[in-house]
Image (cartoon, helix red, strand yellow):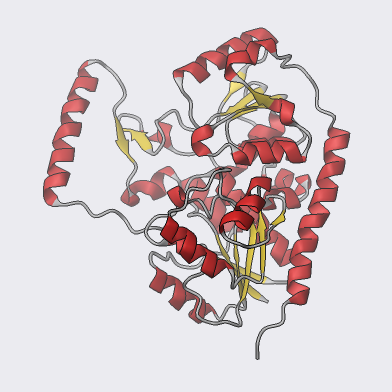
Amino acid sequence: MKLGILTQPLSFNYGCNLQAFALQRVLENMGHQVIILDRWPKEKQTTFLETVKFDIENALKDIIKFLLNKPIYHPIKETNKAYFGEKILAFQNRYLKKSSVLKSTDDMAVCVKLLTLDGIIVGSDQVWRPAYNVDGMLENMFLDFVEDSSLLKIAYAASFGVSEWEYTIEQTKRCANLIKKFDAVSVREDSGVLLCEKYLNRDASHVLDPTLLLDKSVYEQICLNNHKEITGSLFCYILDNSPFIKDMIKKIESKIGLQSYMCLPPSPEGCYNVFNKKESIFPSIEYWLSCFSNASLVLVDSFHGAVFSIIFNKEFWVVGNKRRGMARFTSLLKTFGLENRMLDINEVFKVDLTEKIDWKRVNSIMESEKEKSIVFLYKTFKEYNPPK
């Protein structure tokens, strides 16, 4: 079959790129042709006066920072994204098959017709979280643009990100009608099963994130020879790097005697250092994977950070990130019986950070859950009977 994958915009997010890569690879291994539908929101239009006001305010801030000898950060814009994300784009160009950029529901409808797709798979990542889907994208993630009733419609490991319902009444009504047309629905979190039943009146299966469906050797091959620059053994993949977290890392280093290393640029999220642009270039996905492969211990506040710690069988601890969605962490850790790897920030130094994980048990669970997830896909394709 010729299949399209619809997921979150493939920006500089390592986990997002790798889950798209993994789902594409899994489907290709099943014998399908696959393309990722590259949906993005429209760029925000600003008036001339808004632009002038913004430029004046930032110029004043920059002067003050310059006088105080502090770094000056500006937002990364569409026009210079290719520079800061060049290494991420290199991975996409090498490993991902993508459509042209699609910025509206009409674009999506036209693209599907031109590609003559047999089916579309929505997932994984937080494709069903309203906060991450603006400009009509939420309904797109429920395939509102599909006019052909014979098209196979699957949700694979779709995520709401949270355990509470965030949709408006109107969004709930529209998405409940759209999900009825899906041939099969699966979600990434156990809480997502309940949300589908309660608010969308649809049964859903609980499956693994697609990154967990591939063998570790696939990722090892990608990150081969990309660890030469790494110094340290405590890998800290922290998305929200607050002063408190920085202080905590220093104390952990001192307590367990490991040197930490990071991967993300030191610039604030979505910004670059005007005086040192190279500092703000994102490391490659290959290098990011090598950071896990090289580590003795991993500290993360990222869902896919926890996922790849498990894939590489690395001792790890999770700092809960409520802003980005806690349900993802709790469901993942519960699946593998690793609930105790969630750190309470206030209790972190009361925990034995050298405690080992029983990887034999975890890997046994992994194989069992992987089989269930693959069977979900195989069964859906086998039972598909398009209307004539």
In this image, 190 relative to 272: left or right? right
Q: Residue at x 16, y 33 (%)?
A: 57
Q: Residue furthest top?
A: 254
In this image, 381 relative to 302: left or right? right
Q: Is 238 placed above or below 225 here?
A: above
Residue 143 versus residue 87: which sits nearer the camera? 143
Coordinates of residue 97 in the picture (x, y in percent): 57, 64
Decide if residue 275 is in sight here.
Answer: yes
Q: Is 115 placed above or below 61 here?
A: below
Coordinates of residue 386 in the picture (x, y in percent): 67, 83
Q: Quadrant of the C terminus?
A: bottom right
Q: Residue at x 84, y 43 (%)?
A: 365
Residue 376 versus residue 220: which sits nearer the camera? 376
Coordinates of residue 71 in the picture (x, y in percent): 31, 24
In this image, 350 relative to 369: left or right? left
Residue 154 versus residue 305: which sits nearer the camera? 154
Coordinates of residue 54 in the picture (x, y in percent): 18, 39
Q: Is 165 placed above or below 184 here?
A: above
Q: Residue at x 46, y 52 (%)?
A: 130
